[in-house]
Image: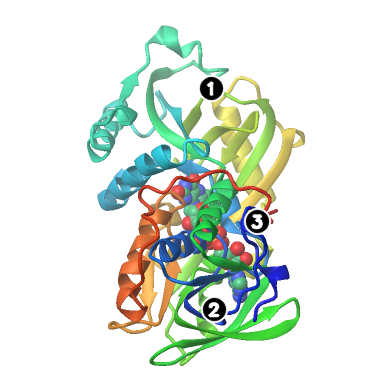
């Protein structure tokens, strides 16, 4: 029996006492992927319990750039499948979550010194439009010189062209909570704070050991989904029999928010130091600047913005805007961890696809999610369900995540 105290349910359903300790699925991690998988499982009619050791969305899913986008820059590394998938998901989110995901104009200025020339950006945007299905949200244009005046302090010396296209912004933690609320409305249960401690993966079910406010509990489930983000391999290390984890690098990304009125859209800039993409985005009335890519060694819980990263972001901002900002203008800063497959390429050039690792090829009991995009959480969850379909009982579906509306969550799910 699970104590109702720990089970966060939607406010309209009064805390009911749960009688079952066996579930079709147990999910570890209350980030966007855990929430998405719980929603997909509950929509399929499966019983599901999600475990979160801290607070919902408190790790990487509240530290992202908060963009719901195809990822224009991934075209440079020929990740066309990822871009198409993300643009498709962007369209679904704009339709299903209009209060949480909003289309915004993006501006790409091209100067004499910019390494990506106007023809290349025009070609990229044309391709982006094609991958986006030529719908009205994938329109783009080159601004006239007169229109440059509306670009809030963008330096115009040596400016050659400015492209405008559209992508979307969200509040990542609010989106995560909304997806989890939808999962709960479909019957998913959430245990919080509840730390996964270990699991024994049997041929026909999983036995899962959890610490709930210092008390040990054991649950069983047909399948276990490891959506623990940067802790993915730590979860695998505590599963028996031992499964070989994927070799990954942890790459931290920092954002700063500066005391500067929000600009009318998102500026997509090329960092002068290394030509990486850096965004200047409106965020709660101010300017958010990000992100960096710094290989991280250490405990995932200890990731913090570094002084060198803050300087890099301020230098990039000051390179492009007339009103220079200093360290004293930083009102907040946060850092999150990317999980990227180990590779000799620089982090910026590495594939950003989500990788799914199953404990066996046929009828897996355990699936681990590596990496991924906030934007593509729903399609990732769909792929997890496809892999696990034969391992769970088939139930009467309660909804389809392609069309389920997402509303901002009420007070039921505790967050930061
Ligand atoms: C800097 C940065 C910028 C990004 N920007 C974007 C963007 O603009 N757009 C986009 O689409 N994607 C973006 N991404 C990618 C996206 O943010 C991530 O892929 C996504 O948030 C990862 O979610 P997750 O659920 O896998 O992990 P997390 O959000 O980290 O969630 C994992 C959860 O598991 C919990 N957990 C861990 N161990 C245990 C345990 N033992 N027991 C119980 N719970 C446990 C943790 O507390 C945590 O809440 C960005 C990523 C980074 C790092």
x and y percentages locating residue 82 in the rendered image = 31, 52
Q: Nearer the viewer, residue 361 or 300?
A: 361
Q: Which secondary structure, mark 1?
A: loop
Query: Would you say residue 229 is visible in this rendering?
Result: yes
Query: Would you say residue 292 is visible in this rendering?
Result: no
Asked if residue 251 is positioned above or below residue 87 in the image, the reply reads below
CA gap, disc 2 to disc 1?
43 Å
CA gap, disc 3 to disc 2?
24 Å
Tell me which label, 3 or 2, sits earlier in the chain. Answer: 2
Tell me which label, 3 or 1, sits earlier in the chain. Answer: 1
Q: Residue at x 54, y 45 (%)?
A: 291
Image mark for residue 413: 3
Image mark for residue 327: none
x and y percentages locating residue 95 in the rendered image = 39, 38
Is 255 on the left-hand or right-hand side of 363? right
Q: Residue at x 49, y 46 (%)?
A: 406
Asked if residue 192 is positioned above or below residue 258 in the image, the reply reads below
CA gap, disc 3 to disc 1?
32 Å
């Amino acid at each position: 029996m699970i104590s109702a105290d720990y089970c966060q349910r939607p406010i309209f359903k009064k805390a009911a006492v749960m009688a079952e300790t066996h579930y079709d699925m147990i999910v570890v991690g209350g980030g966007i992927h855990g929430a998405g998988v719980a929603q997909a499982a509950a929509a399929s009619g499966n019983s599901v319990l999600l475990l979160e050791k801290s607070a919902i969305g408190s790790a990487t899913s509240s530290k992202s750039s908060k963009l719901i986008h195809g990822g224009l820059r991934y075209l440079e590394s020929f990740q066309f499948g990822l871009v198409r998938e993300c643009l498709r998901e962007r369209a679904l989110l704009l339709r299903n979550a209009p209060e949480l995901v909003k289309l915004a104009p993006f501006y790409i200025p091209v100067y004499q010194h910019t390494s990506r020339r106007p023809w290349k950006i025009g070609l990229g945007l044309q391709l982006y439009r094609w991958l986006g299905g030529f719908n009205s949200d994938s329109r783009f244009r080159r601004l006239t010189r007169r229109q440059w005046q509306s670009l809030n302090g963008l330096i115009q010396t040596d400016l050659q062209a400015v492209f405008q296209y559209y992508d979307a912004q969200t509040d990542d933690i609010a989106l995560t909570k909304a997806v989890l609320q939808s999962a709960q409305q479909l019957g998913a249960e959430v245990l919080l704070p509840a730390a996964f401690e270990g699991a024994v993966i049997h041929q026909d079910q999983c036995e899962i050991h959890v610490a709930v406010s210092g008390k040990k509990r054991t649950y069983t489930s047909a399948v276990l989904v490891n959506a623990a983000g940067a802790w993915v391999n730590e979860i695998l290390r505590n599963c028996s029999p031992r499964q070989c984890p994927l070799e990954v690098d942890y790459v931290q990304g920092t954002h700063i928010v500066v005391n500067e009125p929000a600009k009318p859209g998102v500026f997509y800039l090329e960092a002068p130091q290394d030509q990486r993409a850096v965004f200047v985005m409106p965020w709660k009335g101010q300017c958010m600047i990000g992100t960096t890519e710094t290989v991280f060694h250490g405990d995932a819980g200890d990731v913090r913005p570094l002084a060198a990263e803050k300087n890099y972001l301020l230098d990039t901002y000051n390179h492009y805007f007339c009103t220079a900002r200093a360290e004293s203008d930083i009102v907040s800063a946060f850092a999150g961890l990317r999980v990227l497959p180990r590779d000799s390429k620089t982090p910026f050039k590495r594939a950003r696809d989500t990788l799914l690792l199953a404990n066996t090829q046929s009828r897996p009991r355990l699936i681990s999610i590596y990496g991924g995009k906030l934007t593509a959480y729903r399609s990732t969850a769909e792929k997890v369900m496809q892999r696990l379909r034969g391992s769970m009982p088939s139930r009467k579906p309660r909804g389809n995540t392609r069309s389920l509306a997402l509303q901002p969550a009420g007070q039921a799910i505790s967050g930061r």
